[in-house]
Image: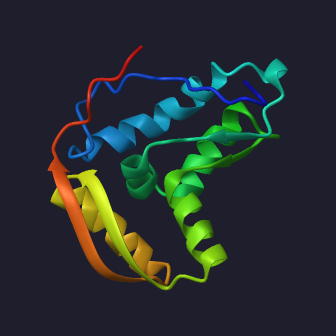
Amino acid sequence: MARGGGRLRYPDPHGGPGNRRVPLAMETRIPEAAGLLPEIMGFDVIGYGCTSAATLIGEERVSAALHRAHPKVANTNPISAVLAAMEALGARRIAVITPYNAQVTTGIVSLLEERGLDVAAAGSFLEERTPPLLA
């Protein structure tokens, strides 16, 4: 897994991304979930893959939660990744498409604008619930 990659699916017991309680509840469970990843694997980085939670919790708090389980391992999340990618590409004026409902999409757009990006257009599939997760 350290070289080839892998996934740990941790079911969301609270519904989906349209429920603001979901990310806040997830924050307390991030260290527990990350703790299931064995240190012996020698991970170089751990990726937290929930854009809506990373937006609403905040990338710094997500990183701190991951570091509680793996203090010496770098980590990332979709928000940190898109900001780094836009900087690397020199992109300032962007368009955003999400699967999320309007509330979550607006939160993502606002965060990107707060970080200096010009979101010229945004679209959404207006999903109210995440698809069922496999255990």
Q: In which quarter of the image is the N terminus?
A: top right
Left of 40 or right of it: where is 60? left
Q: Is residue 44 above or below residue 91?
A: above
Count of numbered circles in the view: 0
Left of 27 or right of it: where is 60? right
At horizontal 54% and vertical 57% (from top left) the residue drawn is 59
Left of 109 or right of it: where is 36? right
- Give the quarter of the image for residue 3: top right
Left of 4 or right of it: where is 111? left
Q: How is the image coloured?
A: rainbow
**Front in this rendered view, residue 39 or 69:** 39
Q: In this view, does 75 lie above or below 70?
A: below
At horizontal 80% and vertical 39% (from top left) the residue drawn is 44
Q: Quadrant of the C terminus?
A: top left
Measured as percent of width and height from the top left, residue 88 is found at 66, 74
Measured as percent of width and height from the top left, residue 103 is found at 20, 60
Measured as percent of width and height from the top left, residue 11 is found at 38, 22
Q: In this view, does 10 lie above or below 127?
A: above
At horizontal 20% and vertical 37% (from top left) the residue drawn is 129
Measured as percent of width and height from the top left, residue 78 is found at 51, 53
At horizontal 34% and vertical 27% (from top left) the residue drawn is 12
